[in-house]
Amino acid sequence: FFLLDAYRALELLEEYYNRLDSPEDKPLKNAIDRVIKVFKSRLFQALLDIQEFYESILLDEQRDRSAKMDATLNLADEWEKQPILKRNNQ
C-alpha cells in the first residue's frame, strides 16, 4: 500500500539522517532535513485529503453507490495526473 511504502521510505531517510554525525556531513544533513520536511508536509496534506474525501463523499448517506464510485474514480484520475507526492522537478 502506497502510504505504508511512503512511511517506510521516510523512516529509512530519517535513519540515514540520524547516522550522519561528522562536521563534514552538515551540508548533507541540512539537505536531507529539507527533503524530510517537504515530504512530511505533502504526506500530511495527502492524509488530510483522504480523510476529507472519506467523510464528505463515502460517508455521505445522500450519495448512492454510483455517485460514490464516480467521485472515487474522479479523485483517482486527479491524483494520477498530479501525484500527491510529485517531485517538483518532474
Image (tube, rainbow, N blue to C red):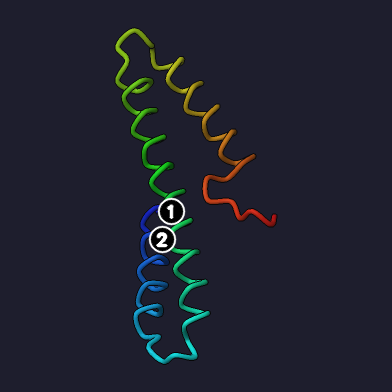
- The x and y percentages for residue 7 are 36, 60
Most extreme residue toward the front is 23
Say which element carries label 1: helix
For disc 1, the marked residue is 2
Q: Residue at x 69, y 57 (%)?
A: 89
Q: Quadrant of residue 68?
A: top left
Residue 25 location (% of width, % of height):
47, 86
Q: Nearer the viewer, residue 65 or 60?
A: 60
**How far, Cα to Cα, is label 2 from label 1?**
5 Å
How crowded is the residue under tag 2: few (<14 C-alpha within 10 Å), some, or many (20+)? few
Farthest-out residue, right = 90
Up/down of 30 relative to 58, above or below: below
Q: Nearer the viewer, residue 44 or 1?
A: 44
Mark 2 lies on residue: 5
Q: How many labels were placed on the picture?
A: 2
Given residues 43 and 6, the one toward you in this image is 43
Q: Residues within 10 Å of mark 1 (few under 14, many from 20)?
A: few
Q: Residue at x 53, y 35 (%)?
A: 76
Which residue lies most toward the top here?
A: 62
Q: Are marks 2 and 1 in contact (CB under 8 Å)?
A: yes
On the picture, is 15 further left or further right than 29? left
Q: What percent of the width, then of the height, locates residue 20?
A: 40, 85
| 15 relative position to 90: left or right | left
**Which quadrant, please, contains the C terminus?**
bottom right
Considering only vertical position in the picture, is 9 above or below 80? below
Using the image, tell me which numbered label, if any, was put on residue 66.
none
Q: Secondary structure at mark 2?
A: helix
Q: Nearer the viewer, residue 12 or 67?
A: 12
Q: Which residue type carries mark 1?
A: Phe
Amino acid bearing label 2: Asp
Q: Residue at x 37, y 65 (%)?
A: 8
